[in-house]
Image (cartoon, coloured by chain):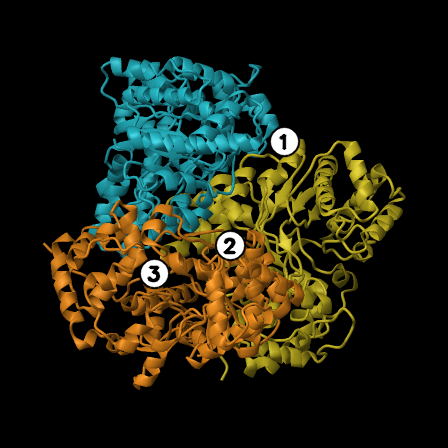
Chain colours: A orange, B cyan, C yellow
């Protein structure tokens, strides 16, 4: 016996009828606005090649760490979910078997945003009308598989169907950006841009760091053994990325620590980390110095800077050894921004040409540090709730804890930050609904006039992100 | 003039009529489910001897640190409340005087869970129908005192009346478990089991630690001077506890730090702490190593492991000196689980035979550390809100901050963790109501189908705890 | 086209009709109670001289860091807002130009408490009935300017109109308290008292500390080179402040660290910091010791002690250099109270003569540290949400996180803590509304009888603050 799959039109709105009415009215205005996705991890090859997605499991389960980490936490081996291994040893290769296993455990997602996103994809993208469970696994598989075989489900068709105005991918400076060139050369009208993510040539803890530096400078025709050469290489690649549409850089650091060394000290530090064997303090100091260097280059070239600090990557040694990085074992750490950012901010934070967007996985910093910082420093803006906090409750807490000190205009709208392409509209829809719900509460409690709430609803869904990311 | 004491049937449910309706329906289904109490501090002697409770004050005030700490915070001396002293010097001995003093200050509990629990006990257990205050103190005292003199209020009768399916007490490995044996031998059908709490022989900071080690190993016939002997003694006592029904161990540590030393290093560390005079780092390292040893033994013998870290015990030196430990002066500390648990988890965390239930008094770790950890590691589960957070708002925050990342199925239902026997049904009732309220909100906001909410309500009240604790 | 400015009578009350009805009833009872303002930063010169306020910008914008920090965060230069400079170089001096610039950016305050306070001032104090925006800037300016020219808007008239029963200012021990004397001598009936804020002679990091010590002791006729002389000077000034009405002291420290050194060690420490050149550890230790000394003096003289720890002052070096301190660049730091307060509490915390009111900007400490501490130690009380948390959401979180462990009676009512005189009634009104909203929720969820909620509403608005501050 199947159960109906319903996406209620009022989902995520407060239950109180009056508040819900306001939320509905606000949402009606923003529901169909184009999607601006300024930060994410979709694969540009999809849009370059426009090839069909191969099967339901490879599209929706195998690459989605939100999905397989939950199953793993309840004892389902990653091998059985077809997650590929570092050494190439075989894991489950039958997509239907993977799909059935997923369906058997779909109840684990009750109350999670993954459930909201997946149900949206099932209903809105594939037209499914029953709940996923063991008994409907094959019906799901067959429906999705058949759809993927059609042209309407190729990446570019979905891009257009989803109403995406612009999407940014994220690339390393070592990336030749061939896919972005191919997209541009193809004549297709979709706007897919890149973003500059220099971690592999900025973080000395990156495996192969010395080799990365060599290639990075060689591509730019610069001298990797010199600090000025290394900085010039950054300028070269930043310009190359801007030519591929980039308007932003992205930095994933273990902490938000910054430094502002005199040039000679910075050069000496670079020499130490370049040769390998620098100690942990030097490694951290180099990352810290590079954030300030990147901010300085942003002042010059106008690229918006994003900082995503404080995650313990790959907490599970056994999973890391067998399956590699990004397999659901990353765990947040406490955040610290006040002392950490001071050197960078004292150098560039009052410069109106700089925009630095801050993200955190430590919600305690919202009201204590981030909102006070963003409510003072001209360069700072607050990124949306990220990763584990890209969820209804996470969004609610973000607004509850940042609005009163930083206001709305020091925030930058929503980022989906995802590689799960099909979920992008669902994620933006959750954000729009939750922002409308928050505004509706302010209106219902007479803390904000309704006409101003309408203006804000549009700003949060569309205007602010476009402005902040200079799109 | 007395005021009526009312336990409203809708208490703790959201005010919104639609949401309340859903909560009511969910709660109707779970209200009368048996109570599983897998972790607590009731005295097994009560059930062994089945003696009458002596008087209202000795039952409800003198032993309850939730109660007397609040009065103490407002200037009521512990002496006047009859709290016994370390040196045996006299304190108030007239239970009626203690009761009147308590009644005079009952307004202090407004808005606290103690008030909810006590009112429930007064109304449901003793049939009182007016609010406790100075003017009703004697009426209360007489009513309760009279009831306690009857057989219907003996421990076993209350156990049965409360619908307790199983209750776990907590004992030291030095405990002979005579009371549990007496309960079993008595032929009474109530299931009262123990839990293995080895802190007195694991934490070198315990007063009398060396002596404890000696008795611990002697009881097991093992050599206390050898690391293998010490570990074997743990295995002996764990088996002894399992024979007395135990399915779990419990560990109250100053931090969640774990270690995984090579055997020789562990043996050397044991030698240092055994002889006394180990420095603070060694003491912490020994506790850390022992958590990993306990996890290894749990893999082998199937006992569920519980960790309650990060409390500053006995913050008030004067109260400690006069009245001893557990007198309301324990204060929570910041929690840290990510670096702390990694050694244990890398050793045993992927083993499906291990269940490690984590508790915290630092709610900031819910969304930042605990939910991400439990949403990945197969061995981890999240214990319910504990101690200061065993309250309506505490429960609400727990679900709001853990559900979206860890789901419901990585949590283990409710623990009352109490020595206040009469309050046990009230505490479980609060938990059931608050979980139903949370589920009702998800339903009312169309984030969860109502049929799934019904399944979850039962899981949270009964199924999950039974499964997690292997009862 | 102008838009109406409305202060809805139900503002800040929950939308649910039943809960709102309870909130309304509770609020009706406390709305018109006199204002007790036991902690703030109004200028006693206003009440001494009773001079007219000069113009709208100088009254409402130039001195209000809540206001200009938000504009600054969005790129409006402080120069253009007329903020005075350290070196006296000119900034904007036309108050109408400043006012227009403010009006152009008024949308930035949407969702902030500043908006609530300002709208209240505009509507209730000046009778304005349209929303402030660029198009109404001149109408606002002219209306306010004209009002300020009348006697009804002089400080004493507003004091009386606002229903202020007593207000405390805050002064340094170096202050001669002439304004307070003048107020008293004037025969005016308004009760304006001072509070003892010894930071300039307690914190060795204060610029001019040595000179401060000299003047401090000279005013008291004590020997600044001796530790007993220094302590005696404190006693002298505390008595002088008490004679000017003070019932409290206030301490703004970088942390809540306290110490309890033997007298000789304290004397030696004083000698080191007095001569300058003490290291950071000594400086921190001296502040720590002085908190315990101040507590001891409070035991003796009955002054209520307030502690406001953990702010990084003047985070923006460029703003500090040009505009000085208190220019919107202060950022909160993590709080720590458990280890920090133990020395002071073990010395004086069980003494019923001491009241120590704790404030925090780190909300994570509410449930983890502050409520457990205040729910045990007789001397401790919790101050209201402060500064960045003096807001509807901040107040809601305070009650949600402290009530269940500390109850209501370990809190002390509301402090406005402001130099924005005209906003004082608005701030107290927000606090009264939010407390009524919280109580109404407890009533609507049947967690508190309604008659007790009425008693509590009055206690939170009036009784508790009067008792705690011994007013």
Both marks 2 and 3 on one chain:
yes
Label 2 to label 3: alpha-carbon separation: 31 Å
Both marks 1 and 2 on one chain:
no
**Chain for disc number 2:** A
Residue placed most toward the observer, C256 or B232: B232
| Residue at 55% across, 42% down | C370
- Of labels 2 and 3, earlier in sequence is 3
**Chain for disc number 3:** A
| In the rendered image, the vertical position of residue A207 relative to residue C366, given as above or below | below
Residue placed most toward the observer, C188 or C433: C433
| Residue at 76% across, 65% down | C50
| In the rendered image, the vertical position of residue C410 relative to residue A386, given as above or below | above
| In the rendered image, the vertical position of residue B134 relative to residue C116, given as above or below | above
Both marks 1 and 3 on one chain:
no
Q: Is residue C105 visible?
A: yes
| Residue at 40% across, 34% down | B292
- x and y percent of residue B102 in the render? 49, 28
Q: Is residue C423 visible?
A: no
The residue tagged 2 is A335
Q: Which secondary structure lies at badge 1?
A: loop
Q: Which secondary structure lies at badge 3?
A: loop
Label drawn at residue A82: none
Mark 2 Cα-neighbour bin, 10 Å: few <14, some 14–19, many ≥20:
many
- x and y percent of residue C369 in the render? 53, 42
| Residue at 57% across, 72% down | A229
């Amino acid at each position: 016996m199947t159960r109906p799959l319903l996406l209620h039109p009022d989902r995520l709105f407060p239950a109180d009828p009056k508040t819900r009415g306001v939320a509905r009215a606000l949402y009606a205005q923003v529901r169909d606005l184009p999607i601006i996705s300024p930060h994410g991890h979709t694969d540009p090859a999809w849009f370059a090649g426009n090839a069909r997605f191969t099967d339901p499991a490879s599209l929706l389960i195998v690459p989605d760490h939100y999905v397989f980490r939950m199953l793993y936490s309840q004892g389902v081996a990653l091998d059985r979910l077809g997650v590929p291994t570092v050494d190439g040893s075989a894991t489950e290769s039958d997509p239907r078997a993977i799909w059935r296993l997923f369906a058997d455990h779909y109840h684990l997602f009750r109350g999670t945003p993954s459930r909201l996103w997946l149900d949206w994809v099932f209903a809105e993208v594939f037209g499914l009308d029953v709940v996923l469970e063991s008994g409907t696994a094959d019906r799901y598989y067959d429906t999705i598989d058949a759809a993927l075989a059609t042209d309407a489900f190729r990446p570019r068709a979905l891009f257009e169907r989803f109403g995406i105005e612009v999407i940014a991918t994220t690339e390393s400076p070592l990336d030749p950006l061939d896919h972005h060139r191919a997209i541009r050369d193809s004549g297709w009208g979709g706007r897919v841009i890149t973003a500059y993510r220099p971690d592999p040539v900025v973080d000395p803890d990156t495996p192969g760091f010395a080799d990365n530096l060599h290639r990075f400078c060689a591509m730019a025709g610069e001298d990797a053994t010199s600090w000025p050469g290394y900085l010039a290489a950054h300028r070269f690649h930043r310009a190359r990325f801007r030519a591929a549409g980039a308007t932003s850089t992205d930095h994933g650091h273990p902490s938000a620590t910054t430094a502002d060394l005199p040039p000679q000290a910075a050069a000496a530090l670079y020499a130490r980390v370049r040769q390998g064997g620098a100690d942990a303090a030097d490694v951290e100091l180099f990352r810290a110095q590079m954030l300030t260097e990147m901010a300085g280059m942003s002042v010059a070239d106008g690229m918006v800077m994003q900082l995503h600090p404080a995650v313990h990557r790959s907490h599970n040694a056994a999973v890391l050894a067998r399956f590699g990085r990004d397999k659901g074992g990353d765990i947040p750490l406490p955040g610290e921004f006040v002392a950490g950012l001071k050197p960078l901010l004292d150098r560039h934070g009052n410069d109106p040409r700089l925009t630095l967007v801050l993200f955190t996985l430590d919600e305690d910093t919202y009201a204590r540090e981030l909102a006070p910082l963003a409510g003072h420093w001209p360069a700072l803006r607050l990124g949306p709730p990220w990763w584990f906090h890209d969820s209804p409750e996470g969004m609610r807490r973000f607004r509850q804890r940042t609005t009163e000190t930083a206001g709305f205009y020091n925030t930058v709208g929503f980022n989906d930050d995802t590689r799960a392409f099909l979920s992008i509209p669902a994620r933006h829809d959750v954000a729009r609904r939750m922002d409308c719900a928050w505004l509706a509460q302010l209106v219902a409690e007479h803390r904000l006039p309704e006409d101003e709430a309408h203006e804000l609803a549009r700003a949060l869904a569309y205007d602010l992100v476009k402005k902040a990311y200079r799109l």
